Amino acid sequence: MPISVGFIGLGNMGSRMSARLVQEGYPVHVFDTNAQACERVAEKGAVVHATSKAVADHSECICISLPTPRIVRDVLLGSDGVVHGGKVRRVIDFSTIGPQAAADIAEALAAHDIEYVDAPVSGGIAGAEKGSLAVMVSCGAEAYESLKPIFHIMGKVFYVGDRAGQAQTVKLANNLLSMTALAISSEAMVMGAKVGIDPQLMLDAINAGSGRNTATQEKFPRSILTGTFDFGFGMGLAHKDVKLCVDEADKLGVPMFVGSAVRELYAVARSTQGDEADFTAVCKLIEDWAGGAVRQGQTPSTGS
Ligand code: NAD
């Protein structure tokens, strides 16, 4: 019989990751502050509880996928939090919260005999659905060995170290690169649109050349050329990740000239479009400024 598992945070990522655990035969206990999110996961076979503590009363191992470091702290250490549950022994944190928060939370949980497992992921909602995420893990070797079956359900696993926070550093680096690729590709693609080049043709050329990246290969075709802006990662979360990364680099004395510019771009996109906008809408900022949109089938602009 597999161990009972909890899942808290059933949004874009957590809804899909918890469903995979149900499919694999784990008894899964869940909680989210959004009742509709709970209902959707209950339909897949999970048991819904009213608080994070209640999930921790029923699960030896709890997975979380939550938006910010503050929310992760509240859910784990707050008055109705996981720390007060009777059954929980380990917490796998799939959220992106930065190395400092991960280390602090690990220490606070250890004081209650609960082990924190740092395990941020990359690969978006498509990866969460298919179980093809990159899972970056740092924790004690024993926890890693015993939790491997859960990591493998989520995707490809990379054990990067034995201290909480190390996996967060790898994840922040990954997201800085991904977000930078989207930002700079937006600038390049809008430039092409302004001189009347078919955006699909431009993408095809770039993707056969040395400029190809995850934005030109996935985000532009799926969510920008279509005008749907629905890749599945919020603008508020995107800005949070780049900011966490540049703050961390600053603390370490590592210069981030390019990273700082990218952080400012997402800060402006967040303030003009809101937290809930999809992060692919960062391209709209460049489009609005330049007066040229990168859309499939759009009559190419020959603007000034
Ligand atoms: P999301 O906003 O879609 O989902 C977050 C969920 O947490 C929501 O359902 C929300 O209701 C719930 N929540 C908020 N406060 C809560 C609380 N106090 N108690 C219980 N539930 C609460 O976010 P997401 O896109 O699923 O991302 C989750 C985490 O994974 C973030 O840290 C993000 O940076 C990271 N991440 C996201 C992606 C992606 O492509 N979306 C990819 C990799 C990593």
Image (tube, rainbow, N blue to C red):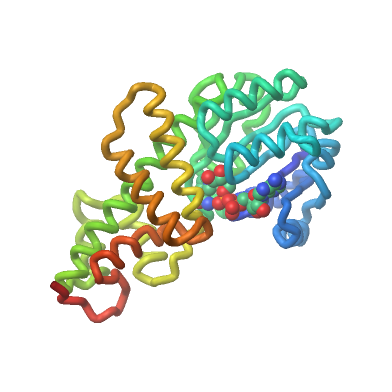
Q: Residue at x 45, y 61 (%)?
A: 273
269 vs 290, left or right, is right
Of all residues shown, which one is farthest toward the bottom? 299
301 vs 216, left or right, is left
Residue toward you, 210 or 64: 64
73 vs 2, left or right, is left
- Identify the image quadrant of residue 63: top right
Q: How many marks?
A: 0
Residue toward you, 59 or 195: 195
Residue 76: horizontal and vertical position, in percent?
71, 34
Q: Is residue 278 above or below residue 159?
A: below
- Identify the image quadrant of residue 299: bottom left
Residue 193: horizontal and vertical position, in percent?
21, 69
Q: Check the picture and name the quadrant holding the N terminus.
A: top right
Residue 175: horizontal and vertical position, in percent?
42, 42
Residue toward you, 70 or 238: 70
Residue 63 visible: yes
124 vs 176, left or right, is right
Residue 265: horizontal and vertical position, in percent?
34, 50
- Identify the image quadrant of residue 163: top right
Residue 21 visible: no
Q: Residue at x 27, y 39 (%)?
A: 258
Q: Which residue is drawn at 50% across and 25% down?
A: 166
Q: Is residue 279 above or below residue 263?
A: below
Q: Check the picture and name the quadrant holding the C terminus.
A: bottom left
Residue toward you, 90 or 248: 248
Q: In this view, does 107 lie above or below 49?
A: above
